[in-house]
Amino acid sequence: MKLISGIQPSGNITLGNYLGAIKNFVKLQDNPDVTDFLIFVADLHAITVPQDKQALRKNIRSLVATYLACGLNPEKVKIFIQSEVPAHPQLGWILQCNGYIGELERMTQYKDKKERQTQGVSVGLLTYPSLMAADILLYDADAVPVGQDQKQHLELTRTLAERFNNKYGDTFVVPEPFIPEAGAKIMSLAEPTKKMSKSDPNPKGYIALLDDINVIKKKIKSAITDSDGKIAYDPVNKPGVANLLTIMSCCSGSSISDLVEKYKDSNYANFKEDVANAVVAEIEPIQAKYNEIINSDYLDKVLDEGRDYAIYFSNRKIQKVYNKVGLGRKTK
Ligand code: AQP
């Protein structure tokens, strides 16, 4: 089974990105059914909304160091930067020409992000899912490990792959989403009905993996709950408490029902303190590894190898696609 996934360097990587995506990647790299695994830094996706040049550069490198610090092993997973592999935007363009404006306008992420733009909505924000489809289809990936919020984009990827295959003949593998059972949607600590996001303008809403340990504790202590005072798992009526239970379950490995039983007579302050300790126990070793790696040459070596691997396979695919569509001169 071939897998591919990526994360945008659009801010500080959050606990949501970690629990919904990276932690799952780390588990999957040891799955004997996984024959190929590519993980990339989706920098071309990040510029669909305005980015500061210096911050973007820093976030790209920081994301690679985070992947490695979280336990991704370059002997099992190829790690690369999307913009260093030209076939991604090349195939993205072809898929844009086979997608419909209506289907792109229906994407929830486009609708949400569009509302937040103050300086105009870029065309790239609308066509983002066709580039994401290209990221996946270039490598014949069978499955894409992602959080719940990416499911709709994955469905569009499947539609685009099937449409292309029907029009031009069998070219792409139609991939499946691979969504973790737990942690697929971690909510904002400040507004627990909203997804935790790295681009949230309110830093109290998210825990960044690189936040200072005391800041992490403070953010959890001030997480929005409710006035009912009871620890129970009820995402509809008690979204804040349900979110903290999910976070604690993912970090500690205990089931939500065991945690509800354990804390049924506890008050919110004691519960939050234990949640904070569980999160810190998960994040502290990642921060230590991150600090060892961030300025090392090792990181560049990993990226060079990943880039060469990705270029080799993606070039073969894009040539095949160009031939099928009738572009340029026929190549072998
Ligand atoms: N809150 C979340 N809970 C679980 N999983 C999440 N993911 C994102 N937020 C959560 C998963 O992390 C991966 C990274 O996705 P991305 O960076 O490509 O874009 P995103 O999904 O839009 O993530 P963010 O953090 O919300 O970024 P911004 O703020 O830039 O849009 C994906 O697998 C995603 O499902």
Image (cartoon, grey):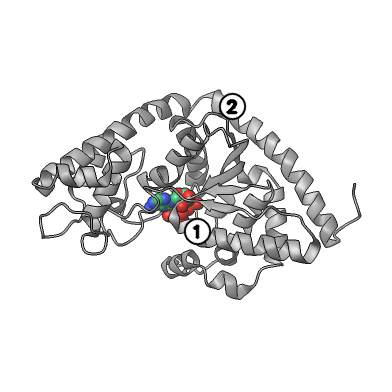
Q: Which mark is residue 151?
A: 1
Q: Quadrant of residue 118?
A: bottom left
Q: Residue at x 40, y 54 (%)?
A: 199
Q: Residue at x 86, y 61 (%)?
A: 326
Q: Residue at x 31, y 38 (%)?
A: 251
Q: Which mark is residue 45?
A: none
Regarding mark 1 in the picture, which secondary structure is present there? helix
Which of the two residues, 34 or 125, is positioned nearer the viewer here? Answer: 34
Q: Residue at x 91, y 55 (%)?
A: 329
Q: Residue furthest bottom?
A: 102
Q: In the image, what residue type sits under mark 1? A: Lys
Q: Is residue 36 left or right of residue 221?
A: right
Regarding mark 2 in the picture, which secondary structure is present there? loop
x, y percentage for residue 81? Answer: 60, 41
Q: If you read the primary sequence from the N terminus, does the residue marked by circle 2 or circle 1 appear first? A: 2
Which of the two residues, 31 or 161, is positioned nearer the viewer here? Answer: 31
Q: Is residue 83 left or right of residue 62?
A: right
x, y percentage for residue 225? Answer: 18, 56
Q: In the image, what residue type sits under mark 2? A: Glu
Q: Which mark is residue 75?
A: 2
Residue 242 drawn above or below residue 108: above
